[in-house]
Image: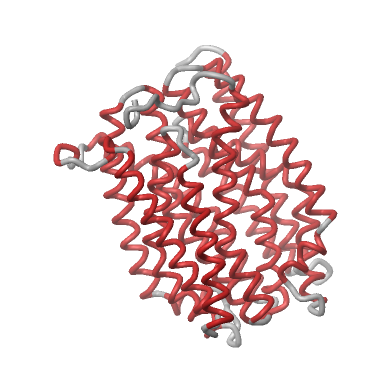
Amino acid sequence: MVNGKKDRTLTTGSIALGLLWFAVPMILGNLLQQFYNIADTLIVGQFLGAKALAAVGSAYTLMVFLTSVLLGLCMGSGAIFSLQYGAGDREALKRSTFVSLVLIGFVTLVLNVSVFVWIDPILRLLHVPENVYPLMRDYLWVIFWGIGFTFIYNYYASLLRAIGNSVVPLWFLGVAVVLNIVLDLLFILGCDWGVKGAAWATVVAQGVSGTGLCVYTVWKFPEFRIRREDMCMKWQTVKEIAVYSSLTCVQQSVMNFGILMVQGLINSFGVAVMAAFAAAVKIDSFAYMPVQDFGNAFSTFIAQNFGAGQMKRIRDGIRVAVISATLFCIFISLVVFGFARPLMLIFVPAHETEIISIGIQYLRIEGAFYCGIGCLFLLYGFYRGIRKPGMSVVLTVISLGTRVALAYTLSAIPAVGVAGIWWSIPIGWFLADVVGVWYYRKGIYIRIYGKVR
């Protein structure tokens, strides 16, 4: 029982409907979360110009990398919560919540202090042009104050999703997004604070969503309140949380570190390419975000059923997930490829023809191959759910390693240029997919379809 109510679980009932009802709030929530940076990009691009857009866009890539560390830790802990919840071990679940809160909170503090201390070396490492540097530094100095709120929100969102509640985090994000947009308009247009205004709008919105979700969870679910008897760092629990969370963290951070390295290469091509990438990557993220969240929901489904020993249900769930993700990816690829120009015009004024042209090229190359990233997200979720998060790290290294190596190699060829960076992305996806499916057939298949170890 949770708070006197019947527990929500993905171990019984219709698989398709269960996955759908659990995934949809997560999808809507992360689509709303994209509005944090979408609002900044839209208003900054339309009212502050190309340099400001380039600064905010490059800062976004850096922040995605930094927050991916915390997101990975929270996702790893969430997978442990789901396994324990599926197995019905409530005492272990309570111990894990305390240990993970302490460990991830400490990492958050260290990360937050570090980025303030190393902000200038980080910007130099990213090869930020001199005419963009001051704007990007101003934006980051403010946005870094929201890192703690990012941890609080993602921690409690992972906890609630692990017990089957994906709706409440959505409501708090919805409030935050509306507040973010209102404050963007107020601080940028009304107060004339420039890029700092966009940053403060995001920080305040993050603070509202994170603090609000924390208070709600503690108030509504008294069994998750930290009691004196829960405040013990048992080695077995610490080890399990640390190993699982760190591997998921590595997977997330490696993925975004690779993107950060590519961002440095993109910056070397000048402001037009930076601005085009800043706008196009928002569209790109928005397009495949639903299948990414479906992969996270799939991971919770797999973990709960793996903890409960429901192998037949896992087999059926794999089939449902693959069909659903493939159909969605085909649809979204057609939309992005066909409407690349109108989508770019949302963020970039029509007279910026060079920026628009570069952005269209990016969207049409990458947008044609979303099935590759869709399959990869399912593989990530599957391996996390069956207690093999290390395999997710391997697939991420393959995908991003290929992407970074090819991006630097192909873009150096004069006849290819910046298009080589765009082509490196789907190539990396598909190579990782091949390895992930091969390992599944060779090492995991017998556990799901035959004898269970």
Which of 184/267 is in front? 184
Q: Position of residue 51 (x, y in %)?
A: 64, 82
Which of 223/449 is in front? 223
Which of 8/328 is in front? 8
Q: Is residue 181 above or below residue 381?
A: below
In the drawing, does residue 338 fall left or right of residue 34?
Answer: right
- The tally of labels here is 0
Residue for point 68% across, 79% down: 271
Q: Is residue 90 above or below residue 229?
A: above
In the displayed orientation, state which residue is furthest to the bottom.
131
In the displayed orientation, state which residue is furthest to the left.
228
In the displayed orientation, state which residue is furthest to the top.
451
Choose top left, top right, bottom left or bottom right for residue 36.
bottom right
Q: Is residue 171 above or below residue 96?
A: below
Which of 435/189 is in front? 189
The quadrant in which the N terminus is found is top left
Visual colour scheme? secondary structure
The quadrant in which the C terminus is found is top left
Choose top left, top right, bottom left or bottom right for residue 295.
top right
Q: Position of residue 32 (x, y in %)?
A: 57, 54
Q: Position of residue 40 (x, y in %)?
A: 59, 70
